[in-house]
Image (tube, rainbow, N blue to C red):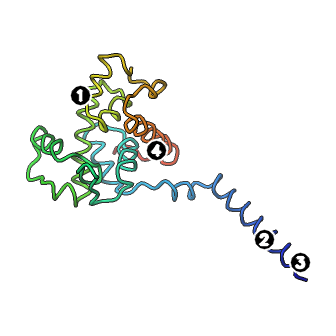
Amino acid sequence: MKKRRVIKKRFFLFIVIVLLGLLFLKSDWMSRWLYPIHYKQEIQISAANYSLEPHLVAAIIRVETNFSNNAVSKKGAIGIMQLMPDTAKWIVKKGGFKNVTNDALSSRADISIEIGSWYLQSLNQQFKGNKYLVIAAYNAGPGKVNRWLSEGTWDGQLETVSRIPYGETRHYVQRVIYYYNKYKALYPDFLTK
């Protein structure tokens, strides 16, 4: 009798695992549950304002804070897009933003997304639309990325990302591209309006 129960439990467990596996592999809703995009409207608006791909903005947010507002890094980066206070101050001045404080960047996702998107657009212009250079510069700073280019350390291509001398930035670029591709596949209609 006991042996039958064990066999039934194992069979039931096997069926549950198979069903979960099928759901995981074949279900968009399961994938979207694992890879959500929060603040969709704010991302779409800011991406449209600065001619960016919303999938890229979402991927950067995912890697930076996993959509967690009020985040502060160990190095002092603030907001959902994790801008350093000095960089944020420069963006606010250069972009002509009015009444944007570090407190607002830290507590309001819409402001952080707007300021971060402006910065991405600025990097996009500086690096002539090379998304890999833009992502690396968002993490390490444009000065370092320009130095890597001028010294021939890295050519700004995904195939040679292993040449990025900073492990953190190398891993960052790979993670952002991973989520960017995931979001493009899962949310094909998540386009600028």
Give percent across and percent down for residue 55. 40, 43
Question: Residue 109, located in which quarter of the rendered image?
Answer: bottom left
Label 1: how many Cα within 10 Å (few below 14, some 14–19, many 20+): few
Q: Give the residue number, with chain letter if any, for mark 4.
A: 179
Dot 4 falls on a residue whose secondary structure is: helix
Disc 3 vs disc 1: Cβ atoms closer than 8 Å?
A: no
Relative depth, front residue between 87 and 56: 87
Give percent across and percent down for residue 76. 23, 51
Dot 1 falls on a residue whose secondary structure is: helix
Task: Compute the Cα span from label 3 to label 1.
Answer: 68 Å
Can you say whether 49 is above or below 100 in the image? above
Dot 3 falls on a residue whose secondary structure is: helix
Q: Earlier in the sequence, mark 1 or mark 2?
A: 2
Residue 111 in the figure: left or right of residue 12: left
Can you say whether 20 is above or below 112 in the image? below
Q: Give the residue number, with chain letter if any, for mark 2.
A: 12
Location of the C terminus (image quadrant): top left
Dot 2 falls on a residue whose secondary structure is: helix
Q: Give the residue number, with chain letter if any, for mark 1.
A: 143
Task: Compute the Cα span from label 2 to label 3.
Answer: 12 Å
Q: Earlier in the sequence, mark 2 or mark 3?
A: 3
Q: Mark 2 is on which residue type?
A: Phe
Residue 38 in the figure: left or right of residue 29: left
Which residue is pictured at 28% across the width and 52% down the height?
74
Q: Earlier in the sequence, mark 3 or mark 1?
A: 3
Q: Give the residue number, with chain letter if any, for mark 3.
A: 4
Task: Compute the Cα span from label 3 to label 4.
Answer: 46 Å
Task: Compute the Cα span from label 1 to label 2.
Answer: 58 Å
